[in-house]
């Protein structure tokens, strides 16, 4: 982006050329790197890995919050105890939600393993 003065908002090719020539002469323009296809592929891989990590973290938080809402504390022991407690209560909707949350956590964890090196 080229800096503009407040009264210099009119945009024409001639004015742009003069401004760019001035900036080039002053050495204020920086080179632009256009990424190659393999660079873009690496960026996509990194984005996918970050998405998988975030999905796993979010699924873990959902499961912990679910257990916490049902009065079993927090942490991994609470998750194990929550599974036992929910199965013991035999409330179909709770069992279904617990199973769904646990399945989602396992799936996202497996996805994250695909990106580990």
Image (tube, rainbow, N blue to C red):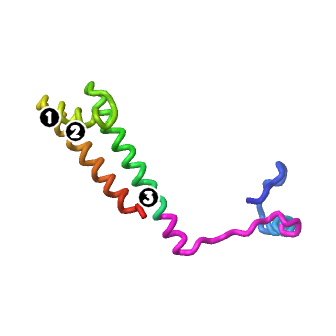
- Part of the protein shown in magenta: 24-44
The circle drawn on residue 87 is 1
10 vs 103: above or below: below
Is 63 on the left or on the right of 17, as rendered?
Answer: left
Q: Nearer the viewer, residue 58 or 75?
A: 75
Residue furthest front in the image: 77
- The numbered mark, 3 or 2, whose residue comes first in the sequence reads 3
Q: Nearer the viewer, residue 5 or 63?
A: 63
**How many dots with numbers?**
3
The residues bearing labels 3 and 2 have C-alpha atoms spaced at a distance of 26 Å
Q: Nearer the viewer, residue 84 or 3?
A: 84
Q: Are marks 1 and 2 in contact (CB under 8 Å)?
A: yes
Location of mark 3 (residue): 49
The residues bearing labels 1 and 2 have C-alpha atoms spaced at a distance of 9 Å
Frontmost of labels 1 and 2 is: 1
Q: Name the image quarter holding residue 87.
A: top left
- The numbered mark, 1 or 2, whose residue comes first in the sequence reads 1
The residue located at (13%, 35%) in the rendering is: 92
Location of mark 2 (residue): 98
Is 33 covered by the magenta stretch? yes
Is 90 covered by the magenta stretch? no
The circle drawn on residue 113 is none
The residues bearing labels 3 and 1 have C-alpha atoms spaced at a distance of 34 Å
């Amino acid at each position: 982006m080229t800096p503009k003065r407040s009264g210099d908002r009119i945009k024409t090719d001639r004015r742009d050329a003069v401004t760019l020539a001035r900036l080039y002469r002053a050495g204020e323009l920086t080179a632009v790197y256009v990424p190659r296809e393999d660079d873009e592929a690496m960026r996509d891989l990194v984005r996918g890995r970050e998405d998988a990590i975030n999905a796993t973290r979010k699924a873990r938080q959902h499961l912990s919050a679910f257990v916490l809402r049902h009065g079993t504390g927090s942490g991994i022991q609470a998750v194990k105890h929550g599974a036992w407690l929910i199965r013991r209560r035999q409330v179909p909707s709770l069992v279904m939600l617990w199973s769904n949350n646990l399945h989602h956590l396992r799936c996202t964890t497996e996805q994250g393993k695909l990106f580990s090196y």
